[in-house]
Image (cartoon, grey):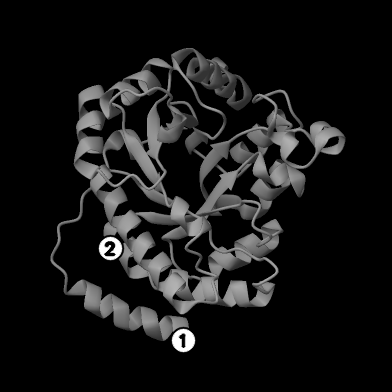
Amino acid sequence: MQRRTFLAGSAVALTAATTLKAEPPEAVTSFPETAPRFKKAVKLSMVGGNGTLTEKFQTAKAAGFDGIEVDGGTRDVPALLTARDEVGLPIHGVVYGKSWNDRFSAADATIRARAVAGLEQALQDCEQLGGTSVLVIPGVVDDATAYADAYARAELEIAKALPVAEKTGVDILFENVWNNFLLSPLEFARFIDSFESPSVGAYFDIGNVVRLGWPEQWITALGDRIRKLDVKEYSRKLQQEEGLWKGFGVEIGEGSVDWAKVRAALAAIGYRGWATAEVRGGDLERLSDVAERMDSVLGLEEA
């Protein structure tokens, strides 16, 4: 009830605003049945070199990507728009990376307020960039933050940004990460549903979940809550032999993910949308290899 009461008051206040809503371009939102099921994207931080933003966008496009996702706290909206328009490579979303440190689940109310303000700014930035989502880490459980407290705080604080999400038309999407929080797909789904808003969903990371289970099972359980995908690989063999984080030390298509089952599960839930690489980046040659591997595991070679 606290959350609903807060949202009602915030929505009234926000309705009084007169800013014009920016519509995302068709290249970001259109996934017709006659086109491939996925559009490939790359994180801006993966594009190596010291070139300008325009040059980085050119590299991403030359490598074979259909779009780009802005991350790392980049706020130079005019420069990003210039690069986008000069190259013709759409920006489909923004990563709110600061949510790892400015946690919605923090005990300190000042940190939580900073997290909400940062999310609201990211939503507004994403709208101006023509994107449709902000990737968010919903909370973190550690020795100083009890699970139940993290859940309650994250639910209440993130709800404060819902009026901005609904006004801008930009979704708040939670990524499954190694944060000791929302450790099953059923709980993840329940957390999303608790917001009772179409502006909230899942940004499903295929590789991140291999440590906890099987991606295809999570996809089935989350269903149409999944709005976007991060694509990476994980090897249980390397995890067992060399350590937990070493599991990420394999290329896409060479680890423990059963990509045929992943594709089948995504098809079963009717997913059509963005699939963004989140692996080691580099120059044009490296990014071209990543794009080709994505084509292979996502079945885009046959499209």
Q: Mark 1 vs mark 2: which is more N-terminal?
A: 1
Q: Secondary structure at mark 1?
A: helix
Vertical side of 226 occupied by 232: above or below: above
Q: Is residue 142 visible?
A: yes
Q: Which mark is residue 2?
A: 1
Query: For the point 15% across and 61% down, which residue is it?
Result: 19
Image coordinates of residue 48 in percent, x first then y, are 43, 24
> Residue visible at 66% across and 52% down?
178
Q: Residue furthest top?
A: 285
The residue that appears at 60% across and 72% down in the rendered structure is: 150
Residue 196: numbered disc: none
Q: Amino acid at mark 2?
A: Lys
Q: Which of the pair 291/139 is nearer the observer? A: 139
> Please, what is the three-letter code of the amino acid marked with disc 1?
Gln
Q: Residues within 10 Å of mark 1 (few under 14, many from 20)?
A: few
> Cα distance, mark 1 to mark 2?
21 Å
Look at 63% across and 40% down and name the residue there. 206
Residue 114 drawn at (x, y percent): 39, 68
In screen coordinates, is 111 left or right of 128? Answer: right
Near-viewer residue (36 or 259): 259
Secondary structure found at label 2? helix
- Residue 256 in picture, x, y percent from top left: 76, 32
Query: In which image quadrant can residue 30 be found?
Result: top left
Return the x and y of residue 182 as percentages of the image width and height: 66, 62
Mark 2 crowdedness (10 Å alpha carbons): few <14, some 14-19, many ≥20: some
- Residue 169 in sight from this viewpoint: no
**Circle 2 residue:** 167
